Image: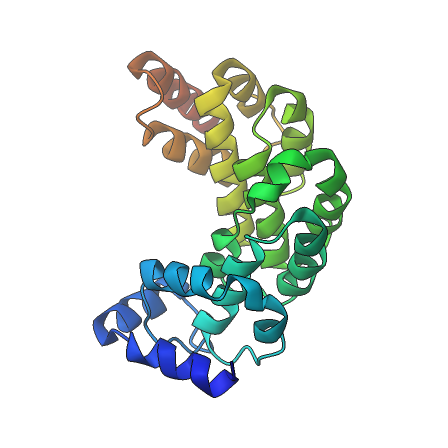
Amino acid sequence: MTYDEVLSRLFSHADESYRAFHKRLLNNDAIRVIGVRMPVLRALAREWKGEFSVLAAFPDEYYEVTLLKCLIADMLPYGSFVPAADMLVEKLDNWATCDSFRAPCLDGNREAYLPYLEKYLSDGREFVVRYALVTLLKHYVRREYLPLIFRSVRMCTDAQYYVCMGAAWLTAEVLAHFFEEGYSFLQEEGLSPRLRALAVRKARESFRLTREQKDRLSALKQSFAAKSLP
């Protein structure tokens, strides 16, 4: 398999209307998008499951090429996933590629992967930090990891936009599974008002919370808004 062969397959599935739509969502004019829909990319990733080392050497000229690398890396066993992900995290420049990671191997290796998450959380680059937050959301929303999650969200008080959105999404996921713990966390005075508001909004959109829980979140948001008034 060559790079030209991969591009030929990708361009054969290009959808111009989707390309224009998705490029607007990515909010980065520097990213080159072919316009291949995710179901097609997932099918190609399954087809090329054993070709990660080949694709890894190809240039990241197009959004879809990097995304394919991430989708294939997700299917690797843990020992192979770790160095692959470490290499791919360096390439993250948008929320969609960042959020595409969901490696089943992490569910059986949560403790082993923690040093990597700690490294990414303290990295400072917007999408590297978001990757860590989204990985926590997908694999670590368990009671024993709540202190780690809350500590990670606290680090995002003055964060870049996509980090703040990731932290709010993570907090909303905690509220869906451990409402009282998440609610107590949102009561902390030092949290960013923007993060708190985004987390409440995201949680209120969820069908997993009751009307009473949503009302409590709204009241909490209003009480903090009232405190900020002169």
Q: Residue furthest left?
A: 17
**Position of residue 22 in the picture relative to residue 188 (left or right):** left
Give 108 or 158, whichever is nearer the viewer.
Answer: 108
In the picture provided, is 18 more to the left or to the right than 2?
Answer: left
Q: Position of residue 14 (x, y in %)?
A: 29, 76
Q: Which of 188 and 136 is in front in this view?
A: 136
Which corner quadrant of the image does residue 144 belong to? top right
* Count of residue discs: 0
Q: Nearer the viewer, residue 85 or 144?
A: 85
Q: In this view, does 172 lie above or below 101?
A: above
Residue 219 position within the rendered picture, expressed as x and y whole percent measured from the top left = 39, 18
Asked if one can make out residue 78 in the rendered structure from this viewpoint, the answer is: yes
| Residue 144 vertical position relative to residue 45 in the rendered view, above or below | above
Residue drawn at 72 percent across, 51 percent down = 79
The x, y position of residue 154, in whole percent, is 65, 35
Q: In screen coordinates, is 196 left or right of 73?
A: left
Name which residue lies at 74% across and 48% down.
116
Tell me: residue 157, above or below residue 9: above
Residue located at (52% from left, 38% from top): 138
Q: Where is residue 68 in the image (x, y as percent from the top left)?
A: 48, 66
As drawn, which residue projects farthest toward the bottom?
Answer: 4
Write down the quadrant of residue 198 in the picture: top left
The scheme the figure's colours follow is rainbow
Q: Is residue 159 visible?
A: no
